């Protein structure tokens, strides 16, 4: 701010002074301010020179401000800078690549009179940022064939691509080459890239080994390691590394603090996050970087402290869209969908410029609430402003929203029109097919996804295993099971293990379902529910209660779904006493309020036994609006059995509620 005050006091301001101010804002991450002064400079009649063009293009690339970037491009052409200044061409390629206009970036690159490592890095970097990892390595091979030697930045970009694609084989190959050229000793940035690559590929042990062998470890190196642990949910390792970093006298930077706030986003270690919050306030970091405010809001929101998150947002000196997004996502994750809608409406009323994260979040809300009308309005908005084709995450969220709202034809249409597909977009469509019972189409879609070089993630595998179970494709399911075992996913993701148990249970192979279940390193309540349900579906209800008792012994708390499955088992075997006991345990021991489905199971047994008075007693305890369906069921049973007195009461109650 001091620099800006001095700048505004100057009687005359030339291109050099303007560039110094804009570059200063760029280096400190205040891109919006840099763009604001770039526009003001043009309005003041300052003629662009090469340094100003480069600063302006960097600003536009950082903000995705393609319109202003194209204006600078036109000025570059007019001044003939592309032919005379190498770095201007590289900056142009970089701007278009950062804005997602990779075809245009390639066009500019092809027209450049000379190529150096900077221009190649700009083009490669654009494809890295947009996840086009196969293209990245083709460009690298082309670069080598043109006799352009890669530098440290090239290797850092390639390592980032390996991490993004989880291509550890290529990463190891690059690691060997980097060691041969002794690049780690000369550039710590490459060493940090290796640490990050191994972490993203799931090799946290190798990542730590590389980190400990670095000739020097600065704040960034520690930050990369801690951020890697944070992204992998290795909470203990992140906390230990943060403590060790401080004991070695290395002060955390804002990026490291943001990673640690992410680590502390659970109630059991919130106290450590609050200590970091105190550190942030003590050093007045909220005034320096608004992103750390967003991280604080995210931490409190994820822990369910939404009022505290709101308070931090209200107190921020600058309320960036990322802070609003963090609060909106917190509301969404905790099921406060209407509150999330309210935040979105505030953004619209205040005319705050939203970004892709905002759209992704609000479309998730629309999907959860089946709010198709609002979802369509947002679809029209993102189509109009070009966001749908500029940002893949927005397109993916739109596909997912239509799928969750039951508009699968529209979801497929959006998917087909996306400029590119990643694992998230493919998974959204596969999930749609699997959820709608079209397992064959889900598997065809999965095959096509793999043929196009997209590697499935854990969520994809869960959806495909569900599809296999729905159509009895046991051979395909067993092949996937073998793949899961090979990749060690049973140890790392409980939901994948649950999906395999579900596959075998759906296919009637309960001995295999039990075998997989018994080998799971972590059995979550979903796994237990799936196995118990499998036994019920196969008519082996005698296995249900022993499994339930084992579940309790192992310290797993049943959820309402568990009790619904057990009540169904009682219903199938006509165990009225068992049903009543389970109902009491659910309400008295675990404090769950029975849902309509739970009541139906118990009432059905009373109806079968002809114990209508007991059924009536149960229904009368239910609040009237919720009991409508149950009174209607009672009316139907009484009508079929000719029970006039109770039938009349059921009729009167039904009409009273309506």
Image (tube, rainbow, N blue to C red):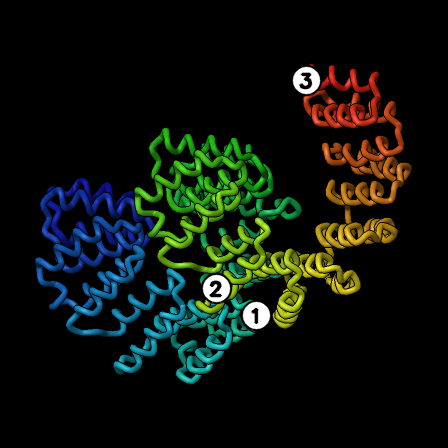
* Between discs 1 and 3, the one toward the N terminus: 1
Q: CA distance from mark 1 to mark 3?
A: 60 Å
Q: CA distance from mark 2 to mark 3?
A: 51 Å
Quadrant hosting residue 331: top right
Q: Which residue is mark 1?
A: 203
Q: Which residue is mark 3?
A: 657
x, y percent for residue 587: 80, 34
Q: Which residue is mark 2?
A: 449
* Between discs 2 and 1, the one toward the N terminus: 1
Whether the residues at callouts 2 and 1 have beta carbons within 8 Å, the answer is no
Residue at the bottom extreme? 180
x, y percent for residue 560: 74, 40
- Determine whether, in the image, residue 643 is placed left or right of residue 627: right
Q: Nearer the viewer, mark 2 or mark 1?
A: 2
Q: Which residue corresponds to the image point at 89% horizontal and 40% vertical from the top-left?
A: 575
306 or 236, nearer to the observer? 306
Quarter containing the N terminus: top left
Q: The residue tagged with tag 1: helix, strand or loop?
A: loop
Q: Which residue corresponds to the image point at 48% horizontal and 60% vertical from the top-left?
A: 423
Decide: is 559 above or below 92.
above
Q: CA distance from mark 2 to mark 1?
A: 25 Å
């Amino acid at each position: 701010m001091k620099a800006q005050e001095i700048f505004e006091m100057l009687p005359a301001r030339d291109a050099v002074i303007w560039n110094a101010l804009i570059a200063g804002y760029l280096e400190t991450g205040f891109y919006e301010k840099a763009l604001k002064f770039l526009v003001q400079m043009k309005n003041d009649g300052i003629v662009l020179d090469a340094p100003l063009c480069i600063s302006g293009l960097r600003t536009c690339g950082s903000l995705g401000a393609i319109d202003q970037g194209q204006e600078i491009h036109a000025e570059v052409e007019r001044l003939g800078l592309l032919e005379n200044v190498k770095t201007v061409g590289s900056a142009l390629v970089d701007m278009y690549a950062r804005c997602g206009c990779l075809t245009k970036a390639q066009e500019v690159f092809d027209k450049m009179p000379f190529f150096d490592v900077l221009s190649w890095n700009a083009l490669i970097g654009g494809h890295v940022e947009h996840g086009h990892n196969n293209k990245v390595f083709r460009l690298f091979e082309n670069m080598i064939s043109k006799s352009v030697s890669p530098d440290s930045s090239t290797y850092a970009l390639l390592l980032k691509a390996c991490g993004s694609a989880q291509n550890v084989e290529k990463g190891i190959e690059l690691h060997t080459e980097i060691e041969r050229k002794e690049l780690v000793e000369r550039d710590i940035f490459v060493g940090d890239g290796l640490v990050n690559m191994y972490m993203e590929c799931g090799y946290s042990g190798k990542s730590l080994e590389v980190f400990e062998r670095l000739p020097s470890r600065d704040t960034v190196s520690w930050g990369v390691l801690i951020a890697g642990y944070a992204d992998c949910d290795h909470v203990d390792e992140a906390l230990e590394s943060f403590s060790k970093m401080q004991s070695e006298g290395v002060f955390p930077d804002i990026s490291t603090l943001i990673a640690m706030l992410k680590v502390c986003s659970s109630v059991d270690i919130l106290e450590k996050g609050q200590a970091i919050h105190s550190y942030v306030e003590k050093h007045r970091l909220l005034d320096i970087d608004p992103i750390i405010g967003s991280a604080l809001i995210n931490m409190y929101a994820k822990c369910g402290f939404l009022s505290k998150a709101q308070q931090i947002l209200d107190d921020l000196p600058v309320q960036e869209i990322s802070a609003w997004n963090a609060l909106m996502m917190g509301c969404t994750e905790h099921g406060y969908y209407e509150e999330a809608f309210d935040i979105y409406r505030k953004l619209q009323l205040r005319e705050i410029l939203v970004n892709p994260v905002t759209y992704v979040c609000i479309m998730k809300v629309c999907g959860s609430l089946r709010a198709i009308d609002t979802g369509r309005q947002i679809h029209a908005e993102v189509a109009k402003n070009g966001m749908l084709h500029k940002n893949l995450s927005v397109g993916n969220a739109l596909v997912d929203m239509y799928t969750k709202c039951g508009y699968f034809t529209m979801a497929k249409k959006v998917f087909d029109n996306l400029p590119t597909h990643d694992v998230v977009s493919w998974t959204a469509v596969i999930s749609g097919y699997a959820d709608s019972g079209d397992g064959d189409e889900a598997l065809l879609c999965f095959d096509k996804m793999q043929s196009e070089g997209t590697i499935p993630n854990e969520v994809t595998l869960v959806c495909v295993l569900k599809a296999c179970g729905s159509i009895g494709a046991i051979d395909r399911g067993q092949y996937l099971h073998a793949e899961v075992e090979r990749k060690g996913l049973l140890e790392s993701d409980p939901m994948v293990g649950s999906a395999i148990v579900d596959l075998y249970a759906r296919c009637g192979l309960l001995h295999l379902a039990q075998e997989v279940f018994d080998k799971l390193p972590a059995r979550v309540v979903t796994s237990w529910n799936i196995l118990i349900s499998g036994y019920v579906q196969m008519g082996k209800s005698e296995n249900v209660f022993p499994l339930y008792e084992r579940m309790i012994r192992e310290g797993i708390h049943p959820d309402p779904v568990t009790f619904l499955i057990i009540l169904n088992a009682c219903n199938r075997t006509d165990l009225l006493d068992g049903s009543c006991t389970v109902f009491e345990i659910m309400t008295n021991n675990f404090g769950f309020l029975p849902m309509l489905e739970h009541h139906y199971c118990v009432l059905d047994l009373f109806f079968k036994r002809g114990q209508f008075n007991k059924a009536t007693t149960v229904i009368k305890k239910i609040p009237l609006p919720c009991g409508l369906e149950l009174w209607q069921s009672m009316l139907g049973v009484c009508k079929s059995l000719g029970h006039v007195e109770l039938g009349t009461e059921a009729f009167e109650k039904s009409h009273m509620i309506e």
